[in-house]
Amino acid sequence: MSETDDAVDVAIIGAGVIGCAIAAAAARHGSSVLVLEREDREGTGVTSRNSGVVHSGLYYPPGSRKARACVRGQALVYEWAARRGVAHRRTGKLVIVPASAPRVDAAVAALHALHENARRSGARGCELISPERAARLEPSLPQCAAAMLCRHSGIIDVHELTRSLLADACQRDVVVATRAEVTRVTPGARDFTIESARGPVRATRVINAAGLYADRVARMVGLDDYTIYPCRGDYFRLRRTPRFEHLIYPVRAPGDPGLGIHLTLELDGGQRVGPDAEYVDARDDFGPAEHKHAVFLEATRRLLGPLAPEQLAYDGCGIRPKLRAPHETRDLDFILREQPAGFLHLLGIESPGVTAALALAEEVADGFLKGQAVVSG
């Protein structure tokens, strides 16, 4: 890459699932596109370390970008996966209140409120079910006081999804530069000069999809309004336990920055619990956290019933790019903000980012890339 080259129409900073989805959408609109990725291949950041869940949109305020993008994105990602042969399974999800839960009446009320929120947000296939039906669906679960079934929740191979999006983009002549960490951006009269480890390049429009580092990229062009707070989530693997058919979630505790330690399924038949939610200082510390074993064991027993300590083994972690500060109790929406003109930032794209990826890409391509104003938040 060199500054003497003709400017591309669109430069995208970050080749996670969001950046790759936007690259594919931008190329379909006829733009010349360059993707700049700091690592040596696509999808190695936030994208590579999550549960791979296709969400339904239960948890987000009605009318929020998270709710809209999750509901729309769920339909789009299932359609894409079926058409492109991306491994996935519509497992369904149970949100349960165990009969032994503390303050069970309050938990049941919270479940009913969650169901109403799902309805108002447009989430499809969500219904309150009886404890007896929950027991028929998952005979190994402890007795429930209440449950909600989300029929369209599922799991997807996020690596395959990201690769398929990038392959589609590259078939339309998108260029990907890896090991190209962006170090400086200079706005010009008609375009931007982006300096990276691979040299400078000019672009008419720039999209910041840098995940955990999106706030740092934003500051390069004078947008100082947002800070990413790294929030780590660890996982433990279940061993020699009953086989579950559904994702199993507790009712989210008020103020919890995560959704509570829950059961996620893997396409190869594996079963994991997690993630928890712990704010950390480092954005790239993925070292083991086996010291959390006792906490995870207690949480898993509350959710799934009796479990011996040796049936739980540490299995890695991910780090979420949260805009919500550690002292705050209210979740924040996905942020899409154009500043300066021609430079779009996607900030705080945590869960349900995988589910929402194609919907966010659609919004960017149909709005920002056509010169339309972007509504923040």
Image (cartoon, rainbow, N blue to C red):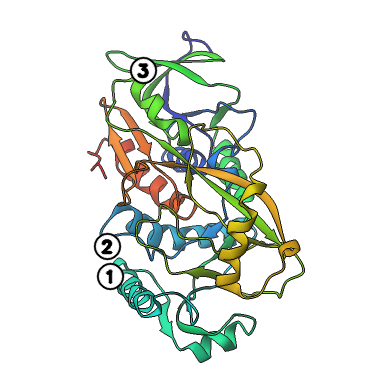
The vertical placement of 256 against 168, above or below, is below
The vertical placement of 347 against 235, above or below, is above
How far across and how far down the image is residue 67, in percent?
34, 59
Q: Amino acid at mark 3?
A: Phe
Where does label 1 land, which residue? 120
Q: Amino acid at mark 1?
A: Arg
How far across and how far down the image is residue 220, in percent?
36, 19
State left or right for residue 153 relative to residue 69: right
Where does label 3 land, which residue? 192
Question: Residue at 38% of width from left, 74% of height from top?
Answer: 107
**Label 2, label 3: how many angstroms apart (C-alpha)?**
36 Å
Q: Earlier in the sequence, mark 3 or mark 1?
A: 1
Q: Amino acid at mark 2?
A: Pro
**Observer able to see residue 305:** yes
Q: Earlier in the sequence, mark 2 or mark 3?
A: 2
Name the image quarter holding the N terminus: top right
Whether the residues at callouts 1 and 2 have beta carbons within 8 Å, the answer is: yes
**Observer able to see residue 264:** no
The vertical placement of 45 against 218, above or below, is below
How far across and how far down the image is residue 247, in percent?
56, 69
Question: Residue at 26% of width from left, 35% of height from top?
Answer: 371
Nearer the observer: mark 3 or 1; the answer is 1
Q: Earlier in the sequence, mark 1 or mark 2?
A: 2
Q: In the image, which disc is placed on residue 62?
A: 2
